[in-house]
Image: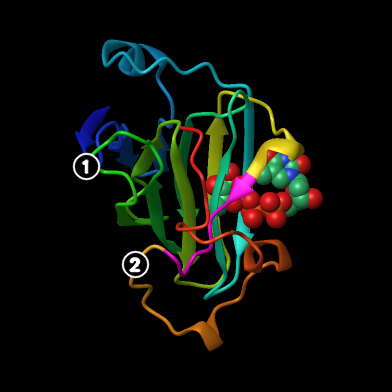
Amino acid sequence: MEFTELSLPGVYLIDGFQHVDQRGEFVKTFHHPSFEQRDLSFKVREEFFSISGKHVLRGMHFQLPPHDHHKLVYCIAGRVLDVVLDLRMGSEHYGKHLSVELSGKRRQMLWIPKGLAHGFLSLAEDSCLIYKTDREHHPESDAGIRWDSFGMSWPCDESSVSLSPRDQLHPTLDEFSSPF
Ligand SMILES: Cc1cn([C@H]2C[C@H](O)[C@@H](COP(=O)(O)OP(=O)(O)O[C@H]3O[C@@H](C)C(=O)[C@@H](O)[C@H]3O)O2)c(=O)[nH]c1=O
């Protein structure tokens, strides 16, 4: 597995092992020693996926401490513009974000450490995003920041974005007091 650190410290884009032959493909999506080698301690406790229509926007989500978690995400069908926002106080990167396209074609993975909010815009019909996390879902700790409050230039306008009722009500980044 090849790990490339992105512009926010501790956020990695990962290329997994892929093998193509006349039968089809073989793709490895997790290899614990590769994470251990980089001091990324990750013991998977939950795995789930979502399927999203074009222009569905989910985010920007995280769990509050002590239920905060690391996430590994990848897309196996369709395309998403995946976005992470740094909420780590005391970091010069606080409030900064980055985005990367994940797709069922390239199958890269994104490692999102604790202290970052995560969200994405689906760029195709039926985009499937798979998650692994190292802590169980804890509804009372499930929190968010408004998608349009931190300077991300989403490639669509507000009227074409489809959001859950919950995602419309998150505080803005300015209103949020970070515990990270
Ligand atoms: C996230 C989650 C939700 N649920 C439930 C709560 C609710 O009834 C239903 C749908 O939840 P949501 O609307 O929060 O789903 P969704 O908006 O897709 O939430 C996801 O968004 C992306 C951006 C993330 O980063 C994920 O960690 C997760 O927060 O599933 C679980 O049971 N376990 C979970 O881990």
Q: Is mark 1 within 8 Å of ligand 1?
A: no
Q: Which residue is mark 1?
A: 6
Vertical order, 61 against 103 (above or below):
above
- The residue closer to the viewer here, 25 or 46, is 46
Q: Which residues are magenta?
A: 143-149
Residue on which disc 2 sits: 151
Residue 147 part of the magenta-drawn span = yes
Residue furthest out toward the bottom: 159
**Helix or strand or loop: what does disc 2 sit on?**
loop
Which secondary structure lies at badge 1? loop
Q: Quadrant of the N terminus?
A: top left
Answer above or below: position of 142 versus 55.
above
Q: Is mark 2 within 8 Å of ligand 1?
A: no
Rendering coords of residue 157 (x, y %) = 45, 85
> Measured from the top left, where is residue 151 in percent x and y?
34, 67
Q: Amino acid at mark 2?
A: Gly
